[in-house]
Amino acid sequence: MRRVLTICLFALAAVLVAAPAALAASGPAPTITRVKPMRVSVGNLLTITGSHFKAQRTRNTVIFRGPNGRTAFAKPRRSTTRKLVVRVPAAVARLLRLSGSRQRPTRLKLRVLSGQFSKFTPRRLSPVVTGVGDGDGGPGGGGGGGTVVCDSSADHDGDLLPNTLELAIGTDPCLADTDGDQMSDGWEYWSSKDLNLKAVPYPGERPFPNALDPSDGAAAPAKFSNIDFDGDGLTTLEEYRAWRSTGSSFDASQAGTPGLGSALGYSDGTKYSRATEVPGVPAWRGPSLGLPAPPQAFPATYDLHGDAPWRDDERDADGDGLSNWLESAGGPGRVSYWPGYWAVPGREVDAWKETAYCAPPEGPQRPGEFDVRPFADLDVADPDVDGDTLLDGEDDQDNDDYSNITELYEVSYDLDNNGLLRVNPAWCGGAAAGMIPSIDRGGVDWAINPFNPCAPDPNSRSCPDYIPFED
């Protein structure tokens, strides 16, 4: 026993001795005491003087840090324990500030990794870096005023606007979204031309979709702007997302034809971005899973207005069988829509747990607002919001075995034809009840609500057996 204890003590002593030695082996952290020159262009040499660098060149790394926190790395060309000579790499160019499509001189902090990290340099040791070819001279970089960048093609940033046009209207050829509102410059430009047909060449001020006005979009992580310039029920950002999700189509030949089309596949400057383009039949996923396809006829079901041209709110950007307006921020595919819907005069229906309406053969029905469990909101650019494989149209938000198609379209028109002339009949036997969406179940009209599992069937598998206490 004593022998085992002795061995353990020797082992512990060895560890205690080795630990400081290991720490000493790593050495002190490097420090930077001088940088020369203090103004240097990308591609030129920079000399860093200090201490505790590695004599072996490849064991040192110089880190450049921009004002926005982005970094670039470089290995020195020569090194001693007190001096590093490094060529400013091309990757540093992306750290420079941009203004008017030009790179501007930018002060960058430096840091050295030589076994350990040095501290970032303070301002007095942080050089000003200029663009390639600008030189290391005075303001503007050797007479160039900043290197012209983002000119590798006629439309460098791919936002549907030529570089020359962007410079003329004040947007940045380097940035597809100059004002950072989640919508590209070109899409806002063409939408504004659709809305203001008299604009030549472009309505550059408010109140139009404006590539220099961040207020017409929404800051991340918000999903929707609250502006709808063309009055079709879809917000600016929703129409942009619809355009992106359908392939970002662009046809300049359709520009300037009000009521017929737009250069954009979806535009917030006209309700008729692709008026003659007939929506296709959704590629239902249920049949491959052993489930029946929705029985409704498509594309006729998309027709919310009952007229010939196809408006943007009737089309289906995500191809899930639900017209865009039904899934919009202000449409019935959002839980927030229903409290206001039931509060309309002549249609007042209390929350489901407070009042029972009518007495059809199967008992009282409570079709109003249902807040006992959460539901997933639908989205104009997401065909499967709950990720269960089924398209949102053939799916069922409240799990009452009545599809979203069946319940949502009744808000806009009489999809199941239990009324006359596309108008839903008065519900519960009285005209005072107003127009309440309903479907025919066994000869009786039952109110529907896509976010209430007790409507239209109070005996559905997901309607609660126990009504909570009132608030």
Image (spheres, grey):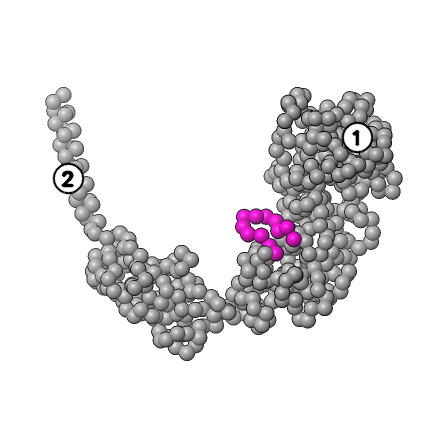
- Quadrant of the image occupied by residue 379: top right
The residues bearing labels 1 and 2 have C-alpha atoms spaced at a distance of 84 Å
Query: Dot 2 lies on which element?
Result: helix
| Crowd class of label 1 (few under 14; some 14 to 19; many from 20; radius 10 Å) | many
Which label is found at residue 446?
Answer: 1
The residue at the far right in this view is: 420
Rendered view: 133 above or below 343: below
Read off the magenta span.
216-227
What amino acid type should be assigned to the residue bearing mark 1?
Trp
The answer to whether residue 223 is left or right of residue 256 is left
Q: Nearer the viewer, residue 145 or 149?
A: 145
| Crowd class of label 2 (few under 14; some 14 to 19; many from 20; radius 10 Å) | few
What amino acid type should be assigned to the residue bearing mark 2?
Val
- Quadrant of the image occupied by residue 78: bottom left
**Horizontal and vertical percent for residue 98?**
47, 66
Which label is found at residue 17?
Answer: 2
**Horizontal and vertical percent for residue 278?**
76, 53
The reply to whether residue 159 is visible in this rendering is yes
Answer whether residue 434 is magenta in the image. Answer: no
**Horizontal and vertical percent for residue 76?**
29, 63
Q: Residue at x 66, y 46 (%)?
A: 329
Marks 1 and 2: which is nearer the front?
A: 1
- Quadrant of the image occupied by residue 47: bottom left
Quadrant of the snapshot with the C terminus: top right
**Which is more N-terminal, label 2 or label 1?**
2
Rendered view: 54 above or below 378: below
